[in-house]
Image (cartoon, helix red, strand yellow):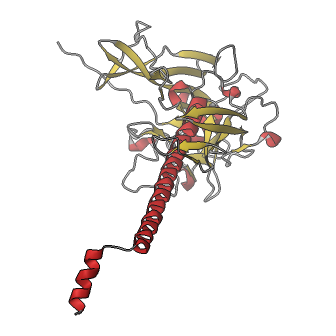
Amino acid sequence: MKTAQIKQRVLAGFTLLEVLIGMVIFAIGMLALMQMQGNLSKSSADGNARSVATNVAEETIEAARSFAQVTGGAGVQAFNNIVTGSATTERGGINYTINRTVTDYWYKAATTINGTGSFVKAANKPAGATDPDMKMLQVAVTWGVGQTFQIDQSQTSNTLSAGSITLTDMISSITSPSGGKVLLNSSANSLYGPPVDYSPGQNPDIVSIQLGENRFKESTKPLPKVYNANERVETSFDVVTYSQDNAGATFLRREEFLAVACECKLRIPSTGTKSGMRPTLWNGNNYTEGEFVSKPYGESVKDNNTNYQSEYCGVCCRDHHDGGTGTNDDANDTGRAQYSPFKASSEYMTSADGPTTLVGDHKHYNIGGVGLATADGATYFEACRLVRKDGFFRVAQDLRQEGLNSFP
């Protein structure tokens, strides 16, 4: 009896109430699906907006890095043009607001021989200083205030969530166009920082050195500045790295060097006092600055004549001393602390030559090499090779003089 009733009910079909309930359930499911699609589209749009905003901020910073000179000029992007301001840009139908906040910093040298100096704001800048040495650039990019985006091919749209990102970077006053990353200008389909052509061999006495992979290196003609004939001379020159192929030569990098001869006064620091820097070394890609360590140091000798010797004799006299102890010492790298790792052992101070605090330092002589400086306050003559590192000249290891024999 029950089986016949069920069969009869199935043959009779669904009632109107059951159909209505099914339609309601289906409608609720479709509404939920539509809402989920909208939320997914909105989340995707928000993520895309954040990525684009990050790119806009990075482009703003790199554009600021790629200035041509320190002070402004007609049509020339300059370091002192990097100032606080705002701008707007449109990317993919979304408007972005760019707010730049710039804080100027000046380098203030330490007042003692053992100090390292620091960067200060305008309120504490050195007397007479004009253009800052560094700028802190903070870029905030905001978007999405009252803006809508399209969900699909229809006119349906949704409101974009408001958001912002902030990037901060330090920009040195010595940064050149080659210091900025290369950017692609999509509108012009060209590089933001274009390759710079270079003409090697401008002077007949300059011989380039091949580095491999179509890269070469050559120096500019040295320019001497004589302070005292046959004694104190400053010589400056640059070393240019470039690439060359059948299309021509392209500038890659320029490095600044100085060679100075100075009169110094020997100083023996108290135990543990950090008094001088280790040599700045070439690591195969760039120069790495040595740490401050406890070692003998020197002071530049001065008199009433302001042009007595190079202004860089202060760092030359202070740092060009071997030995000392530092936190990053490597027992397996005996040449790390030496400015000339190729000196004979007899050229270094021993306990028989003077105070034990001088042991391991290379010997210093007064003019003519007739007297060895062994006491605090003794004068001596020094020669240094300096390389510009992060805006400041640092004492690098001595140049090696090699003999070259040519055979047919």
Residue 291 rendering spot, x and y as whole percentages: 54, 49
Q: Can you see residue 212?
A: yes
Q: Nearer the viewer, residue 159 or 286?
A: 159
Q: Nearer the viewer, residue 169 or 390?
A: 169
Within the image, what quadrant is residue 68 found in? top right
Q: Nearer the viewer, residue 408 or 38?
A: 38
Callout count:
0
Quarter the N terminus occupies: bottom left
Q: Residue at position x 57%, y 41% from top?
A: 319
Q: Residue at position x 36%, y 54% from top?
A: 332
Q: Residue at position x 17%, y 12% from top?
A: 408
Residue 54 vertical position relative to residue 128 in the rendered view, above or below: below
Question: In the image, is 139 to the left or to the right of 35?
Answer: right
Q: Residue at position x 75%, y 44% from top?
A: 111
Q: Nearer the viewer, residue 142 or 41?
A: 41
Residue 362 rendering spot, x and y as whole percentages: 49, 42
Question: In the image, is 213 to the left or to the right of 193?
Answer: left
Residue 177 vertical position relative to residue 207 in the rendered view, above or below: below
Within the image, what quadrant is residue 405 found in? top left
Residue 318 rendering spot, x and y as whole percentages: 61, 41
Residue 148 rendering spot, x and y as whole percentages: 59, 43
Question: In the image, is 370 to the left or to the right of 283?
Answer: right
- The residue furthest left is 408
- The residue furthest bottom is 1
Within the image, what quadrant is residue 12 found in? bottom left
Q: Can you see residue 355?
A: no
